[in-house]
Image (spheres, grey):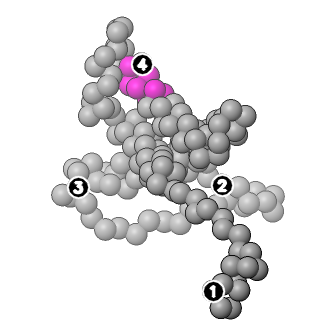
Amino acid sequence: MTQPLGFPVGGWRDLEMHVREPLPLMRVQGRMNFDWQYIQNNFDWLGHIIEALCIAGVVTVLGLVLFKRRTALIIGLAFASGHFHGREKRDFEVSVHMRPPHLEAYEMWRWSWDQATDFWPVAIVMLVLLLLAVRWKRSPVRLVVSSDLAKSGH
């Protein structure tokens, strides 16, 4: 028995290498149709990453009205991360019928496998992009004037 990503239920120690079947496609009246249930069962986490990137993009574009590009990008990525944390936290609260104030929902180790695989891949991708955005520095553009070339001997 395996979980959605193909990992055995027994955990990492029992992980066995096995060949995954290619994405099943069905031909219906000459058109290619995806097996959406297969995608939902096995690639739900990838959809969440794409959704987070779209959310970050929208917030970044909106932020460009008030902020420089880099700052707007950082705000967009942070917003997308927070959005998914809040959404999966709420999913956990509903699934266990938690009563307010919901502070125990921050104990992410209690989340189900589905909730964890919805949140952690998004969190990791957003963190890497945030670190790249924070560390990214534009090198200043230096105009070369003909007098500079003459001084350097070129």
Determine the image quadrant of residue 59: top right
Q: Residue 45 colored magenta?
A: no
Circles 2 and 4 in contact, beta carbons < 8 Å: no
Q: Quadrant of the C terminus?
A: bottom right
Q: How many C-alpha atoms fall within 10 Å of the one at disc 1: few (<14), some, or many (≥20)?
A: few
Of the image marks 1 and 2, the number of the one nearer the N terminus: 2
Give the residue number, with chain letter if any, for mark 1. Answer: 152
Residue that appears at 52% across and 51% down:
133
Whole-percent x, y for residue 31 in the image:
79, 60
Specify the amino acid type for callout 4: Val
Circles 3 and 2 in contact, beta carbons < 8 Å: no
In front of the other: label 1 or label 2? Answer: 1
Q: How many C-alpha atoms fall within 10 Å of the one at disc 2: few (<14), some, or many (≥20)?
A: few
Specify the amino acid type for callout 2: Phe
* Mark 3 and mark 1: Cα distance apart in space: 62 Å
Give the residue number, with chain letter if any, for mark 3. Answer: 12
Give the residue number, with chain letter if any, for mark 2. Answer: 34
Of the image marks 3 and 1, the number of the one nearer the N terminus: 3
Helix, strand or loop at disc 3? helix
Helix, strand or loop at disc 4? helix
* Mark 3 and mark 2: Cα distance apart in space: 30 Å
User: Magenta region: which residues?
Assistant: 86-93
Q: Residue 94 has which mark? A: 4
Look at the picture and state if 97 lies above or below 81: above
* Mark 4 and mark 3: Cα distance apart in space: 28 Å
Determine the image quadrant of residue 16: bottom left
Look at the picture and state if 154 lies above or below 38: below
| Closer-to-camera residue (147/106) | 147
Of the image marks 2 and 4, the number of the one nearer the N terminus: 2
Query: In the image as oriented, which residue stretches furthest toward the left?
Result: 13
Of the image marks 4 and 3, the number of the one nearer the N terminus: 3
